Amino acid sequence: MKALYFDGKRLEFREDYPMPERRSGEALIRVRYAGICGTDLEILRGYAEFRGVLGHEFVGEVVEADDESLIGERVVGEINIGCGECEFCKKGLEKHCANRLALGIRGKDGAFAEYLTLPEKNLHRVPEEISDTEAVFTEPLAAAYEILTQLHLKPSWKALLLGDGRLGQLIAQVLRHHVDLTVVGRHQRKLELLRDLGINAIMFNELDRSMRFDVVVDATGNPNAVLEAIKLVKPMGFLILKTTTSKPSKMPLSEIVVNEIIVIGSRCGPFKPALNALKERLIKVDYMIDGIYPITDWKKAFEKAMSRETLKIILKM
């Protein structure tokens, strides 16, 4: 099958990559579309030390499964695969299993291929109201909804979102309904797209640095942004971190301790509210698509995805 394989140093296209072998309890899925995200780009820079087929944002069709009712269904899939035996797995928290696999990120070939396998329990059927290209956004949108599971937001709170990129656009649309939100970024076009949605979005140099916010979310992808984010959180406020990079970050511990700031790491989230939001048109995603490329044009796709002006690039299998 066709696949994009990363050997730890170089990404390459293979036409004869081995088909994945379906195990008991798993489904074999024919991938239709897969999105390139910031994590994929960071893996190319050394993040997670991954070797294998990249990609974890996908929509596909089940072609083989133990549960025959799944065959022929359009699905998206949660990316973490736990051991099933540890305390976290038994609590339904496979994403924190010490021995977990993660699709296209950790020990498990991903979605930049014609086929992939995932446990059937990880799959979610895609409602007919959601197009294939919209469904590709389910996984990152779920990550945006994870914030709501971690922190009870109050309408009176003032929140600041740092970052106007792929994930930032989704987080902004989720948070706008729960807090008084301001988005800060460095890309005029991306900020204008948010303003078109009715979201208050400004350039970084327009931010009043004397302001303090109840909640600050870092979705910049910049390992040094946390140094600025800390200064914008009220004492006893919340800092939510969404950035994962191959580079280390410095944390200003004294400011965190003295101001009693609560720091929350946040990553994978719930698929059900994400799919419902797409179905009910509560979240818009089509405007973010800056290109759809066949997998054979992967070099052009990744070159485009690496541009700071680009939002979402999608690969078509």
Image (spheres, grey):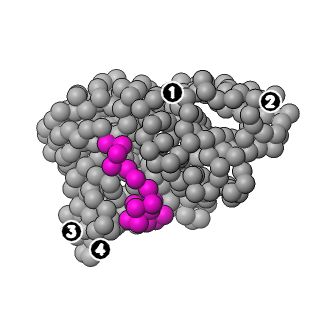
Q: For this rendering, which residue is in front, 73 or 102? A: 73
- For the residue labelled by badge 3, is the local secondary structure a helix, a strand or a loop? loop
Task: Give the Cα separation between the discs numbered 4 and 2.
Answer: 53 Å
Q: Residue furthest right?
A: 258
The residue pinned by badge 3 equals 72
What type is the residue that disc 4 sits on? Asp
Mark 3 or mark 4, earlier in chain: 4
Q: How would you rate the neighbour count of disc 1 (Cα within 10 Å): few for under 14, some for 14-19, many for 20 or more?
A: some
- For the residue labelled by badge 4, is the local secondary structure a helix, a strand or a loop? loop
The residue pinned by badge 1 equals 186
The residue pinned by badge 4 equals 67
Mark 2 or mark 1, earlier in chain: 1
Task: Give the Cα separation between the discs numbered 2 and 1.
Answer: 25 Å
What type is the residue that disc 1 sits on? Arg
Q: Which residues are magenta?
A: 271-289
What type is the residue that disc 3 sits on? Gly
Left/right placement of residue 19 relative to residue 100 reads: left
Left/right placement of residue 195 relative to residue 22 reads: right
Q: Residue 148 location, x and y as percent? A: 60, 57
User: Which tag is nearer the camera, tag 1 or tag 4?
Assistant: 1
Quick check: marks 4 and 2 in contact, CB under 8 Å? no
